[in-house]
Image (cartoon, rainbow, N blue to C red):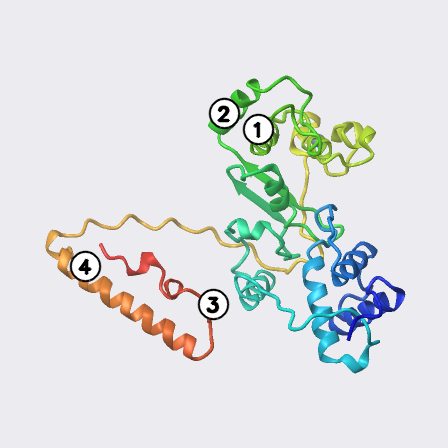
Amino acid sequence: MAPTLRWQSSTGRNTISEIVKKLLPEWTSGLRPVQEELVSDILDSDDVLCCTATGDGKSCAFYIPILVLSEYNTNRAEYPSGLPTRPNPRILCVPSPEYNEETIRLIDEDPELQIILATIAFANGINASSLLASVTVGSSGSSDTTYQEKGRVCRKAGARGRGVLLVSKSSIAQALKFLKTLPSTSSPQPKKKGVGKLTSSELMTCEKAELITEAHCYNAFWNRLYQNPPLETSTLDCITTNRPLPCELCRVRTNKTLLFPAPDSAPNFPPLTPLTAPKPPARVPKKLKLTRKERESGEKKLKRFRDVLGVTEQRMGRFLEHPRIMFLPYPFVRLF
Ligand SMILES: [Zn+2]
């Protein structure tokens, strides 16, 4: 049946809100106005371009329409007919949703898990509200990625969090050298306008170099880069604007001490006990050293054990998406 209604109509929007209320009762206020607009446009197959601040809830633009369609298709009688739909909407998550959920549950509930070593995937949309600090070692591919990484933490209103970027002296020297080769412009340039005749990849490098070498105020840097209004005040430093949480550059200038107490909602875990570095292995007497043949044979057996373990787990329906190597990672099957 051809659709007779639009999701953007009041009937369509009410249906979305009913479905969200049913499927996500924990979202007591339902969708935010910007989310409602995005979701209804996407359900009507309109193309959308959305640019909002980190934490505004952009991610819901790709999963709420799927949930809405899935519910609408399954329980058709409960909702007005005539809204556009398509069969079998799918959510594809890599890694598996169970894996992500389990990781986030452990972050919240396991006292031994207070630090996560994350890959770049973590910088793109994972929402774990108990994370309070993001430390990046080395600069990311672009300033956008860095901003995303910092936006993963301190996602509860009122909580105080930190975004730390550790950059080597040689990277700073490299960035300074790079900036000297550019046509003179007031830095940083707003993203939309670009810098002279630079290509897009050079522009990324330019932004990154400016971030690494920023010497006055990081908050003003981000606001200039993303042109966050009102520019008259957003591009001033934290001291002039009296920001309650100044950036590190401004904090050093004012000699203030900043405290980052855990929010009341934080799990009350005791601090982790410092780890002692393992002692270097004692010199193995020559007669106890594995021969090449023994090493190869041992590694072969360990790999076979890994495969059996993987097959057994997967036959039981567990860890189906995991590659075989994850059942016994490489360092454990390598003998010396
Ligand atoms: Zn500042």
State whether residue 19 is above or below residue 114: below
Q: Tell me, for residue 209, which label it has, or none.
A: 1
Q: If you read the primary sequence from the N terminus, does the residue marked by circle 1 or circle 4 appear first?
A: 1
C-alpha distance separating marks 2 and 3: 41 Å
Q: Is 99 in front, or is 8?
A: 8
| Crowd rating for badge 3 (residues with CA inside 10 Å; few <14, some 14–19, many 20+) | few
| Crowd rating for badge 2 (residues with CA inside 10 Å; few <14, some 14–19, many 20+) | some
Q: Is residue 202 left or right of residue 156?
A: left
Q: According to the image, label 3 marks what residue?
A: 321
Q: Which residue is at 71% across, 64% downward? A: 64
Quarter of the figure with residue 87:
bottom right
State whether residue 237 is above or below residue 115: above
C-alpha distance separating marks 1 and 2: 8 Å
The kind of residue tagged 1 is Ala
State whether residue 65 is above or below residue 126: below
Q: According to the image, label 4 marks what residue?
A: 295
Label 1 element class: helix
| Crowd rating for badge 1 (residues with CA inside 10 Å; few <14, some 14–19, many 20+) | many
Where's ligand 1: which quadrant?
Answer: top right
Give the number of the mark in front: 2 or 3: 3
Q: According to the image, label 2 marks what residue?
A: 174
Q: Is residue 84 left or right of residue 178?
A: right
Q: Is 12 in front, or is 309?
A: 12
Q: If you read the primary sequence from the N terminus, does the residue marked by circle 1 or circle 2 appear first?
A: 2
The kind of residue tagged 3 is Glu
